Image (cartoon, helix red, strand yellow):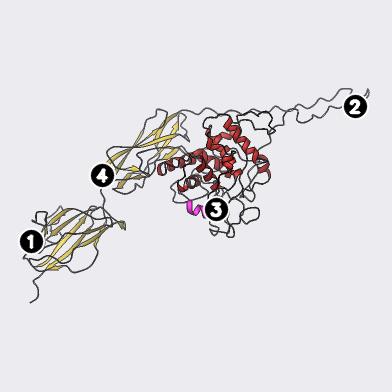
Amino acid sequence: MAAQFGRRLRKGATTTAVAAVAVAALSASGAPGATHATAGGSREASDATPPPGTPVTGNSPYYTDLPPLNTPDKPATSIDLPATGTAEAGIPATVLAAYKQAEQTIAGSDPGCHVPWQLLAAIGKVESGQARGGKVDANGTTFSPILGPVLNGVGFANISDTDKGAYDGDATHDRAVGPMQFIPSTWEKWGEDANSDGRRDPNNIYDAALAAGRYLCADGRDLALKADLDRAILGYNHSQEYLSTVLSWFDFYKRGTHGVPDGTGVLPVGDLPDSSGPIPTPTPTPSTPGSTRPTPAPSPSKPGGGTGGKPSPSPTPPPTPKPTPPPSPSPVTRLEDAGTAELAAMAGHEFTARPTVRVKNAAGRTVPLQAVGFEIVGDTDAVFAGGKKSVVLHTGADGTVAAPTLQAGEKTGTFTVRAKVVGPRVPVVDFTATVTARAADAIARTDDKVLTAAPGTEFADAVEVKATYKGAIASGVAVTATMITAADNPADNPADKPVVNDKGPYFKDADGKTVRTLTELKTDANGVLKLPKIYADDATGTFLLRLTTAGGATVTIELKVAAPAA
């Protein structure tokens, strides 16, 4: 329903025409990056059909402030377009880092979508004013929940509770939640854990930005195409005015942005109805000279009057202070390990630790929003999440950035993960990573059948075992099978190696020769190993078969050879 209320509507656009004119002016200016796909006020945009289903926000209200323009007012227009200002181009550091990280993540997993971070920034601006000007902690979580109005059908959509108040605190109706304003039922489907803290939190800008990007890319959309771009935005909020507003900010951010400290972003004017907390209204700017009439000075009094015949001077307004420009940042001079734990993993498993670095400048301060590249170097089949060998990410508000999760391949040994600053020449940081062979910490038979055979025959039942590691299936684990003399090794065997029996049950090699030790056995995808046939010679009695896994897990199995009963 695209409801817009009070000061938000008056501040942003009194009619849809304002948004259309703004976008048209942007396109006409020939600004870098302006494309046909951003012409939100065009007829093609207004004819776009939103996808079916409930929109991400439940059609909650949104901020209608428009970005400043470089294009001067055109002749014959009655709309005063705002002057260009650098403040609106500033996006809080952590919020900006979240948008860029989402773009990088989706580019790795869904390269055909082409979701630009500037589009996420445009939606974040319209939905929450960039998380209320960047009021987030170091992990990207808002200091207090951002809640839209109650969706009870009174001026808004009517959406009954879907989360028992878990996200929005309302067990009767839903409310849009977080900096990207997901309704709870949509968040349940699209929510992401982008900052790897083990939670999918709609009030975390990293989680919310990635979820928004994933949603925009749904159904195989390619956002480089105008029709797909319009449809994706309309799926976020079913409103042509919303489409025009988002596209105007999208174009604005494509023409240039910069990071600002968290909590210092420009806030929209007014507040959302029923939101969780007030958004302060900016201090009014000084009046334009001539817009108000000065109080006239009193007429000189007649001789003998109280003023002595001298007029009272008019008060002089204080000069408007000029803002002090921020100091130029010191150059990046150092890249350091930010406390990375040991990088080790078993073949086929994920590394539990992630290479993490910190960027500092010449003053020793951390540098946010600095691009850092991570690259896998060496003879290895290990990859980053998404199958990549190299990625570029940006530091967060605290100047640190972690590489994506590493996935070990089947090749064992060591390799290097190299971190380097993109741009300035700063010494790299190398991390040594180790891949060990697949292992099991437990192995056991899959049944308890008694294994028997008559002399000179083969055992009717096969030996089958299953290996596990920390309770999970241990696939591809090497196993050695040995016919041994005793369960406990004799005292004269200090190497603790089983003594191979030279009589009793045996295996056959490829040439049909007798062998009593088999190597190069491996568990299958289910962690199961079925041994080849076992044969009995003329010796009778109870014999022992020991299976030993990579990792040291063992199981000893009895094999009985006895003449058949008369």
Mark 4 sits on what residue? Answer: 412
Looking at this rendering, what residue extends furthest in the left direction? 538
Q: Amino acid at mark 1?
A: Lys
Residue at x-position 56% and y-position 37%: 39
User: Dot 1 surroundings within 10 Å: few (below 14), some, or many (20 or more)?
Assistant: some
**Which residue is nearer to you in this view: 9 or 304?**
9
Locate residue 72, reporting x and y percent.
64, 28
Q: Residue 503, labelled with which disc?
A: 1
Amino acid type at image mark 4: Thr
Rendering quarter of residue 283: top right
> Could you give the CA–CA distance between mark 3 and mark 4, rounded to whole angstroms?
49 Å
Circle 2 is placed at which residue position? 306
CB under 8 Å between callouts 1 and 2?
no
Question: In the image, is residue 322 above or below residue 194?
Answer: above
Q: Residue at x 34, y 48 (%)?
A: 350
Percent position of residue 54, x then y: 55, 53
Q: Earlier in the sequence, mark 1 or mark 2?
A: 2
Mark pair 3, 2: CA separation: 75 Å
- Residue 132 appearing in the image: no
Circle 1 SS class: loop
Query: Mark 1 or 3, which is nearer the eye?
Result: 3
Q: Closer to the camera: disc 4 or disc 2?
A: 4
The residue depicted at 86 percent of the width and 27 percent of the height is: 298
Quick check: is 190 in the magenta stretch? yes
Q: Nearer the viewer, residue 71 or 518?
A: 71
